[in-house]
Image: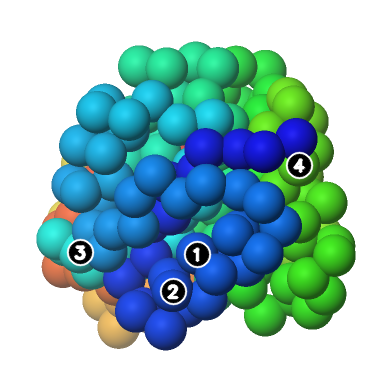
Amino acid sequence: MSLRVIVAEDAVLLREGLVGLLERFGHETLAAVGSADALVEAVHAQRPDLVITDVRMPPGDGDDGLRAAVALRDTYPRLPVLVLSQYVERSYAVRLLDSCGGAAVGYLLKERVGAVADFMAALGHVAVGGTVVDPEVIQQLVKLRHDPLERLSAREREVLGLMAEGRSNASLAAHLFVSEAAVNKHIGNIFQKLDLPVDTDGHRRVLAVLAFLSA
């Protein structure tokens, strides 16, 4: 089965390599682009049979490619998408893999795509509505779906509960009869165990409280 494919990958050598590989197996590359914005434009214009996209791409050099894939699946629910990445971006990966009941979607890590035949088989499987997910991706998503508070100690849960009440560090210290340094250590442990992004403490406090409330 010959497929009309759009490739989105900002690394030129890999992008051209994918194009050559697709042509070798009889598929047509409608567009080969290097940014998430170009991917969206190409899909709207060309309506491909399948999209292959990286996660980290311009314009933001963050998870733009994956977010674009999620948005495209919202617009075109039957659009097959195969993600190739060097890492697992967990939040948007969940949204992508949950879209359309997980049909016609794949998420593979580049370093684990070791054989051309296996890759092309995965591509064909996704194109006809199947699901292909790298074992490492599955492991990461299983961790994400667990209650994030399970990793916290009893004291850390208590601290987080008081944070949810809007207490300052000084108020926490007074309530728990400990030093502010001890409170800061507990809060640091909470941020680390909840896998919160490195950002300002204020932003991470909000994320921690949201995790507490959702759990």
Q: Residue at x 85, y 62 (%)?
A: 118
Viewer-nearest of labels 1 and 3? 1
Q: Residues under labels 3 and 2: Cα distance?
A: 17 Å
Q: Name the residue under label 1.
A: 19
* Residue 44 in view: yes
Residue 16's tag is 2
Q: Is mark 3 on a helix, strand or loop?
A: loop
Q: Mark 3 points at which residue?
A: 58
Residue 124's tag is 4
Say left or right for 193 vs 164.
right
- Of pointers 4 and 3, the one earlier in the residue sequence: 3
In the image shown, does 99 or 104 lie closer to the viewer? Answer: 104
- Of pointers 1 and 3, the one earlier in the residue sequence: 1
Q: Label 2 near label 1: C-beta < 8 Å?
A: yes
Q: Where is residue 74 in the image (x, y as percent from the top left)?
A: 39, 19
Residue 129 position (above or below residue 93): above
